[in-house]
Image: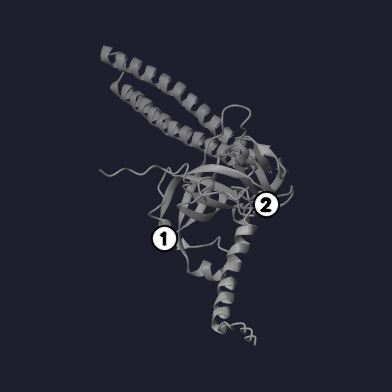
C-alpha cells in the first residue's frame, strides 16, 4: 500500500508581505541609479555658486545731476541758438534776450563817463592856471609890487578849483562803475553754457516773454563720468566698505551687459527705499545711499568705454564683493 504524497507546505502570509515591502522600498533606488546620467559632474568637477556680500538696487547718475537753466533777466527772447540733442561747449550761446534796452543803457553810461572825464580835464587846466597866477601875485606882494589881498584871493581860487577837481574825480569813478554795471546787464541778456554738455530739453522759442521765475528753459547733461547711486539695506551697512569691488548689471534682465565698479563712499543718513517695486517693502525698508564709480576702461582701443551707453536714471542691480575679487580680510595671529 502506497503512502499518501506530502502536501505542499504553506508559508505564512506575513513573510510574503515583508518581501513585497522590501521590494517596494528598493525599487525607487534602483530606478534612480539607472536614470543617473553618465556625465553628471562629481563633487570635484562641480563649479562653485558665486556668493556676494550684498545685493542692492541702484540707478545711473552723474555727480551733481542734470542742470536746469533759466534766463537771468526778464525780457523777450530774440534768439534760441541750440536744439535738443546738440552738444555744446563751455561758453557757447544758448539763448539771447532783446539787447536793445541794455545797449542804450551802456551808451548812456559811456557818455556820462566821457562827460566826467572832459570836466575833470577842464578843471585841471583851470587849476594849473590858478596856481600859476597865485604864485606870481605872491611873488609880487613879497617884492612890494603888489598887494597881499590879491595874492590871497588867487590862492583861494586855486584851492577851490582843487576841491572841484577832487569832486569831479569821484564823479568820474561813479560814471565808470555805472558803465561796468550797464555792460554786466548787457551780458545777462545772454545765456551761455557753463561747461561742456548735451542739451536734453529746450522749452524756449524766439518771441516768448521770459523771466527768472518762469522756470527752466534748458536742461543740460554735463559731460561727466557716470556713477551709480545704490540703495544699501541697513543690514548690509557694516559689510560694505569704500574700495570694495562690485558688479553692475541692468535691472531689465535683457542682455548680458555687465560693468565693473568700486565703492566710492557710503552715506551717513538713512532714508526710505525708492527703487523697490513692492510698495510694502518700499514703505518699511530703511536704506543708505552707496555711491559707486565705474572702473576706468583699458587704454587700448580694444576696450572702449561702454559706460557711455548708460542712460541717466537707468535702473541697475549692484552685487558687492564677488568671491574672486572681494577685498581680502586681515588675518588674525
Looking at the picture, how far across and down is residue 156, in whole percent?
34, 28
Give the quarter of the image for residue 15. bottom right
Residue, disc 2: 254
Residue 37 visible at all: yes
Along the line of sight, the residue nearer the viewer: 271 or 180: 271
Q: Residue at x 42, y 60 (%)?
A: 234
User: In the picture provided, is 2 more to the left or to the right than 46?
Assistant: right
Looking at the picture, how far across and down is residue 99, in whole percent?
67, 41
- Tell me the number on the disc at residue 235: 1
Q: Which of marks 1 and 2 is nearer the N terminus?
A: 1
Q: How many marks?
A: 2
Along the line of sight, the residue nearer the viewer: 211 or 125: 211
Q: Which residue is drawn at 57% across and 84% down?
A: 13
Residue 192 visible at all: no
Q: Which residue is drawn at 35% across and 27% down?
A: 159
Marks 1 and 2 close (CB-CB < 8 Å): no
The answer to whether 34 is drawn above or below residue 169 in the figure is below
Amino acid at each position: 500500500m502506497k503512502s499518501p504524497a506530502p502536501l505542499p507546505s504553506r508559508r505564512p502570509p506575513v513573510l510574503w508581505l515583508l518581501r513585497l515591502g522590501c521590494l517596494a522600498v528598493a525599487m525607487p533606488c534602483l530606478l534612480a541609479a539607472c536614470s543617473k546620467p553618465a556625465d553628471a559632474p562629481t563633487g570635484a568637477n562641480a563649479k562653485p555658486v558665486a556668493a556676494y556680500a550684498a545685493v542692492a538696487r541702484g540707478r545711473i547718475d552723474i555727480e551733481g545731476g542734470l542742470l536746469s537753466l533759466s534766463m537771468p533777466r526778464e525780457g523777450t527772447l530774440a534768439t534760441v541758438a541750440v536744439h535738443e540733442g546738440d552738444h555744446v561747449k563751455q561758453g557757447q550761446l544758448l539763448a539771447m534776450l532783446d539787447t536793445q534796452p541794455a545797449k542804450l543803457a551802456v551808451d548812456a553810461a559811456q557818455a556820462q563817463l566821457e562827460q566826467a572825464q572832459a570836466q575833470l580835464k577842464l578843471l585841471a587846466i583851470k587849476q594849473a592856471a590858478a596856481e600859476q597866477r597865485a604864485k606870481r601875485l605872491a611873488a609880487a606882494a613879497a617884492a612890494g609890487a603888489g598887494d597881499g589881498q590879491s595874492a590871497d584871493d588867487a590862492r583861494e581860487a586855486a584851492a577851490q578849483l582843487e576841491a572841484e577837481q577832487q569832486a569831479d574825480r569821484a564823479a568820474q569813478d561813479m560814471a565808470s562803475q555805472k558803465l561796468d554795471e550797464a555792460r554786466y546787464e548787457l551780458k545777462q541778456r545772454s545765456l551761455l553754457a557753463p561747461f561742456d554738455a548735451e542739451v536734453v530739453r529746450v522749452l524756449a522759442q524766439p518771441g516768448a516773454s521770459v523771466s527768472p521765475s518762469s522756470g527752466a528753459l534748458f536742461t543740460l547733461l554735463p559731460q561727466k563720468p557716470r556713477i551709480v547711486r545704490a540703495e544699501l539695506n541697513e543690514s548690509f551697512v557694516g559689510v560694505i566698505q569704500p574700495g570694495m569691488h562690485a558688479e553692475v548689471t541692468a535691472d531689465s534682465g535683457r542682455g548680458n551687459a555687465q560693468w565693473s565698479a568700486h565703492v566710492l563712499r557710503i552715506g551717513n543718513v538713512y532714508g526710505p527705499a525708492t527703487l523697490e517695486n513692492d510698495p510694502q517693502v518700499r514703505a518699511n525698508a530703511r536704506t543708505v545711499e552707496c555711491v559707486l564709480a565705474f572702473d576706468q576702461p583699458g587704454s587700448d582701443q580694444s576696450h572702449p568705454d561702454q559706460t557711455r551707453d548708460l542712460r541717466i536714471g537707468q535702473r541697475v542691480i549692484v552685487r558687492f564683493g564677488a568671491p574672486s575679487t572681494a577685498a581680502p580680510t586681515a588675518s588674525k595671529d
